[in-house]
Amino acid sequence: MPALRIPRRQAHGDDLSPEEASKDIRLWKVWSYGGVAFLVAFGLKLIFGGEHHNPEKKAYSHLEIRHKPWAWGDGNTSMFHAAFGKQHHGGGHEEHH
């Protein structure tokens, strides 16, 4: 059985001249540094951007139909309830300390 001959695939940029390759390198550096600068600025905005205020909860009766209390805790919050910024049954947000 003859062996299969698989042609070698050229990596991107193998057929570029040195001048074209250096242009590509410069382009990738500009995009990389620009992307990093954007991500750092976005991260700083998230960290130091100020207080986030939750909107008032609208009391839609069909969203909180509960016929009996939960079997854990105070019966009013889900098992994975985190008090920070979460809405609770009955409307509004819990205050965190």
Image (tube, rainbow, N blue to C red):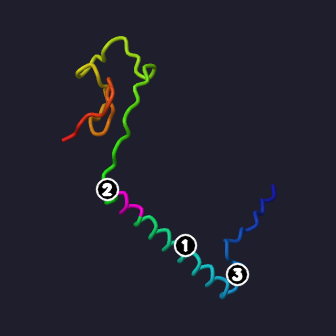
Q: Residue furthest left?
A: 97
Tell me which amino acid carries mark 2: Gly
Q: Tell me: residue 75, above or below residue 42.
A: above
In the rendered structure, the answer to whether residue 63 lies left or right of residue 97 reads: right
Image: magenta residue range? 42-46
CA–CA distance in space, label 2 to label 3 = 49 Å
Q: Position of residue 31 (x, y in %)?
A: 55, 73
Neighbours of disc 3 within 10 Å: few (<14), some (14-19), many (20+): few
15 with respect to 36 (left or right): right
Q: Going 32% across and 35% down the picture, which residue do you hit? A: 86
Q: Amino acid at mark 3?
A: Leu
Left or right? Give the position of 13 relative to 34.
Answer: right
- The verdict on residue 89 being magenta is no
Quarter of the image for residue 4 reads: bottom right
Residue, far right = 2
Q: Report crowding for label 1: few under 14, some 14 to 19, many 20 or more residues within 10 A (C-alpha).
A: few
Name the element at disc 2. loop
Check disc 1 and give the amino acid type: Trp
Q: Residue at x 30, y 18 (%)?
A: 70
Q: Name the mark on residue 16.
A: 3
Q: Classify the position of the N terminus by image quarter.
A: bottom right
Q: Quadrant of residue 78?
A: top left
Mark 2 or mark 1: name the one nearer the start of the chain.
Answer: 1
